[in-house]
Amino acid sequence: MLPQPTVRASVRPEAIRQMPQQADQPVVAEHNALAQAMQLMGAVMPFLRNSEIFGENEPAEYVYRVQSGCVRTYKIFSDGRRQIVGFYLPGEIFGLEFGGEHTLSAEAITDAKVVLVKRSAVTALAGSDPAICFELYALTGRELQRMQDRVLLLVKKAQERVASFVLEVAERGGSGNVITLPMPRRDIADYLGLTLETVSRVLGSLEGATAIEILTSRCIVLRNRSLLKELMS
Amino acid sequence: MLPQPTVRASVRPEAIRQMPQQADQPVVAEHNALAQAMQLMGAVMPFLRNSEIFGENEPAEYVYRVQSGCVRTYKIFSDGRRQIVGFYLPGEIFGLEFGGEHTLSAEAITDAKVVLVKRSAVTALAGSDPAICFELYALTGRELQRMQDRVLLLVKKAQERVASFVLEVAERGGSGNVITLPMPRRDIADYLGLTLETVSRVLGSLEGATAIEILTSRCIVLRNRSLLKELMS
DNA sequence: CGATGCGTTGATAACTTTCAAATTTAGTGG
DNA sequence: CCACTAAATTTGAAAGTTATCAACGCATCG
């Protein structure tokens, strides 16, 4: 048995209007029944760069899976500051909620295609298929683990946070030493709890230490992984 | 279906030797089947103040529930710094893992009694009882939500973190405006990602602002809840 | 070309840590 | 119950880190 979704609003109208502007990125291979089932049951919806996928306090009616592009979830504080809670790459699932409403907002970082699945459908599926039920539980556990790692990251110094971030993107984004950052400095800063100036400066100092090489602002090369891991402290 | 536990080591010998030194604190009322089942199936084990309950990288063979006292989970960084990831009060469950080994260590903050339940037993129970299965999922979701809130907390300024912490303890610890802090300043600091000196100074400034009153270092009175909430920003 | 968004760089200010010392509290034994 | 010792907390001054404010460079796009 899984939590019953609170079914309220339908698909957000502004989301339907948006169209992608670039070709899809390759979808990360998935080997689990949940992702496959979502792919079959869900509707693909395109989102323009910087457009909202869902907003804080809206009814959590859907579960989302990135098909192409990149998504951020975040919260805006009363003083206007923004904290990015998570980045989601192709193949990853986001928007899981345990109450009736979203506690975070979500936006497309790049033009993106997102699979939407009714939360009630996922719930029903989990009720009938123990494997799905377990995967939902495991997914939540992985998300918890990731959030715990973020707690451990956020108490470190700027250089350690940025070095960790670079390595995280390198590992999640795929293989190879050339990594593409889908998000601007501002997003990295809000993810790491720093300012964009500090992120820029630290990236520069990492390059000075020959740990990385900055080809363009969105493309960097890992030059010395073990050094980076040391700088993570 | 739930994750199969990796059964390896038995109960840690040093834990068995320890005896409580003070009377039990009242157990928070629980209205869920999981906690009740754990209470029935589990063995109560006493831990002395500052003694280890489990250690990082040990096989995660048990799930734990605080019966009395207070527990902290934490990680030690390579440079010796410690980050406390969670505090657990009577009635709360800790030690849930999704891999085979503990990713954190756990210690008793005060003398404590902890109920240990075999992870395999919880797994079996969840497999046979959908309600238990759901509660395990819900528990993980609450833990995730709590960890997310901590991410949002750790990017704020010292005063906001301390104000949030005071209010969190007030809400979790029970009713009333007189709150008892079970943990020393050092633990609060390591939980909030600050130094103990900063925690002490901020508490002093909160008292100066008549938001709180510090009776003793472990006992403070909420004087102005709404002001505290503002200072949380 | 000028406008705009994004990124870098520099100087200064604000905040937190670090190091040190004083003070209070708690635990223990007489 | 008091004195004594150790631990915890508070307080102060200086140093370090990051944020803030400001200017500049560099693309893209109309």
Image (cartoon, coloured by chain):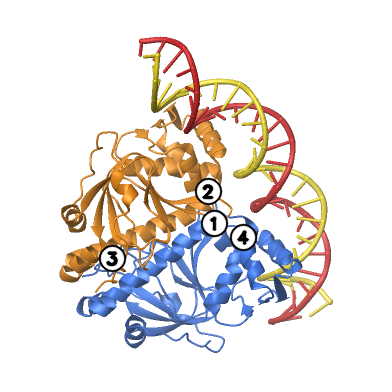
Chain colours: A blue, B orange, C yellow, D red
Q: Please state the horizontal and vertical placement of residue A232, each as a whole percent of the image.
A: 61, 62
Residue under the image location 31 percent in, 65 percent down: B8
**Label 3 environment density (alpha carbons within 10 Å; few <14, some 14–19, many ≥20):** many
In the shown orientation, is residue B45 left or right of residue B211?
left
Q: Do labels 3 and 4 share a chain?
A: no
Pick the front one: B12 or A117: B12
Residue under the image location 41 percent in, 39 percent down: B183
Residue beneath disc 2: B193
Q: Which of marks 3 and 2 is nearer the N terminus?
A: 3
Eye-nearest disc, 3 or 4: 4
Q: Is residue A84 visible?
A: yes
Query: Which quadrant of the rendered structure holds the N terminus of chain A?
Result: bottom left
Residue beneath disc 3: B137
Q: Earlier in the sequence, mark 4 or mark 1?
A: 1
Q: Are marks 1 and 2 in contact (CB under 8 Å)?
A: yes
**Label 2 environment density (alpha carbons within 10 Å; few <14, some 14–19, many ≥20):** many
Residue beneath disc 4: A160
Residue beneath disc 1: A154
**Label 4 environment density (alpha carbons within 10 Å; few <14, some 14–19, many ≥20):** some
Q: Please state the horizontal and vertical placement of residue A61, each as a whole percent of the image.
A: 32, 71
Q: How far apart are marks 3 and 4 (CA)?
A: 33 Å
Q: Do labels 1 and 2 share a chain?
A: no
- On residue B105, the disc is none
Q: Is mark 4 on a helix, strand or loop?
A: helix
Q: What element carries label 2?
A: loop
Q: Are marks 4 and 1 on the same chain?
A: yes
Q: Distance between the residues labelled 3 and 1?
A: 26 Å
Mark 2 belongs to which subunit? Answer: B
